[in-house]
Amino acid sequence: MRGILILTAAAALVSFGQTQAPRGKLTNTGKPMAVEANCSDDEIQALGLSCTREDPCQLYLELTAVESTGTRLFAAGNIHTSTVTLNSILLTSDDGGQSWTEPVERIRTAGLEQIQFLDLETGWISGQLLLSPARDPFLLLTIDGGKSWRRRNVYSDSRNGLVEAFWFDSRTRGLVLIDRVQTGGEGARYELYESMTGGQSWSVREVSRKPIALKRPPTDLESRGWRLRADAASKAYRIERKQGEQWQTAAAFLVAAGICRPAPVTESADPPPEAAQPETSPPPQTTPRQAPTLNKKGRKP
């Protein structure tokens, strides 16, 4: 599912694509884990949400892609309400699913969708801002096995588009296919870009009104012994590994991801009435005193 966002006048005034700090570590105890998600009053107003203290908006986790590199696992997706995408999320585990952290900040209104690792160190994740329509497609790049990520936009300016597919055949050369989604009947809808810098920069290679086929080898995660599955019974996404003929759960994440509600309004108390000042007698008259004269050593003579 790609999130849908109807922009309001208030939303037009904010800078989308801002980030939020990553959350703490999640520990796998065998039960589905719950990611931490909430929203600020600014986000409620900017995104046109109708969340209230009495009737908060439910937040949901959506995982769209899983990748494995040895014992390291990656799960990417977004957090959304029933109407809008709140932000992207990337979860990673260095111990086969026993503990999970977020190695990159969440990107406001964005979703992550496809993951490719060329080797144990070099990888990419595609994403875009899930507005209406989707816009500003980008890739996250890592060269240290997913410990750190850098965001690189496909376009040099802001425009409609989403990453339909991408593929790298080396650490430097890659292709990304962009669907412009809504072009107003003018121009080509599909664009193929090429990078010779590992995704740091992109140049247009082909444009077409008809879909462009991106030639790449089949990427079947299940053939490598992993799969991502939505489980209705537990209301969770399950990351499973094949052991012999059976699929075993390596980790599970609850779909429910918290609630979004405005902060409580703090009412300021009325200031206490001014205390009556007691009547006082005028100070007694005193005879002025001269300051003592001091010698050079600071003592009285």
Image (cartoon, helix red, strand yellow):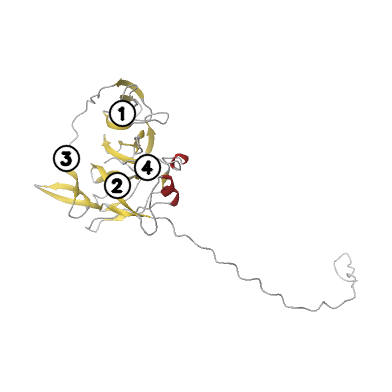
Q: Position of residue 92 (x, y in %)?
A: 29, 47
Element under label 3? helix
- Mark 4 sits on what residue? 109
Which residue is rendered at x = 36% and y = 27% of the image? 197
Spatial CA span between label 4 and label 2: 21 Å
Residue type, label 2: Thr
Spatial CA span between label 2 and label 3: 18 Å
Residue type, label 3: Arg
Q: Are marks 2 and 3 in contact (CB under 8 Å)?
A: no
Residue 220 appears in the picture as rendered:
yes
Query: Which callout, 4 or 3, points at the residue further toward the start of the chain?
Result: 4
Q: Position of residue 188 (x, y in %)?
A: 32, 22
- Mark 3 sits on what residue? 224
Q: Nearer the viewer, residue 145 or 125?
A: 125
Labels 2, 1: front one:
1
- Mark 2 sits on what residue? 92
Query: Which callout, 4 or 2, points at the residue further toward the start of the chain?
Result: 2
Q: Nearer the viewer, residue 201 or 94?
A: 201
Residue 178, label in figure: 1
Query: Which callout, 2 or 1, points at the residue further toward the start of the chain?
Result: 2
Element under label 1? strand
**In which quadrant of the rendered image does the C terminus lie?**
bottom right
Residue type, label 4: Thr
Element under label 2? strand
Residue type, label 1: Ile
Q: Are marks 4 and 1 in contact (CB under 8 Å)?
A: no
Labels 4, 2: front one:
4
